[in-house]
Image (cartoon, rainbow, N blue to C red):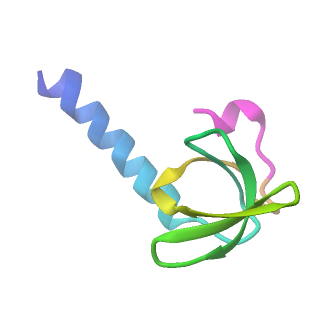
Amino acid sequence: MYVVLIRPQQIRAKKHAQLISSLKPRDKVVTSSGIIGEILTIKEHTVTIRSGESKFEIVKSSISDLLERPGEPQTKEESYK
């Protein structure tokens, strides 16, 4: 039971925590609601992103994936692993 249910969730949570702690301004991210934007500022619990002409302040935990980091281009397949 542990190996099938609990351990995979712990691994996903650890990867997400590493993602959140590695965020930097100018990173391109996607939120859990599907908004794609570029990080402008990072605070303790929130991140300000720009999407199009709009700015949003969102909680860090709502960031679901890093799409692109300046200077480190990724392919689409790499960003959705």
Q: Can residue 60 be seen in this snapshot?
A: yes
Residue drawn 65% across and 39% down?
34
For the point 59% across and 68% down, the residue is: 47
Q: Which residues are magenta?
A: 73-81
Question: Is 5 or 35 nearer to us in this picture?
Answer: 35
Question: Which residue lies at the image location 20% right of the left edge and 32% below the top edge?
Answer: 6
Residue 5 drawn above or below residue 22: above
Q: Residue 7, located in which quarter of the rendered image?
A: top left
What residue is shown at x 77% (from left), y 56% (from top)?
72
Vertical arrangement, residue 78 with respect to residue 66, above or below: above
Q: Position of residue 14 (x, y in %)?
A: 36, 50
Q: Position of residue 62 (x, y in %)?
A: 51, 51
Residue 58 falls within the magenta-colored stretch: no
Whether residue 68 is visible to the viewer of this picture, yes or no, is no
Q: How many marks?
A: 0
Percent of width and height locating residue 43: 54, 78
Q: Is residue 77 magenta?
A: yes
Q: Is residue 53 above or below residue 4?
A: below
Instruction: Using residue 59 as the reference point, say whether residue 79 is left or right of it.
Output: right
Q: Quadrant of the N terminus?
A: top left
| 52 relative position to 22: left or right | right
Query: In the picture provided, is 73 more to the left or to the right than 41?
Result: right
In which quadrant is the C terminus drawn? Answer: top right
Closest to the observer, 19 or 74: 19
Q: Residue furthest left?
A: 1
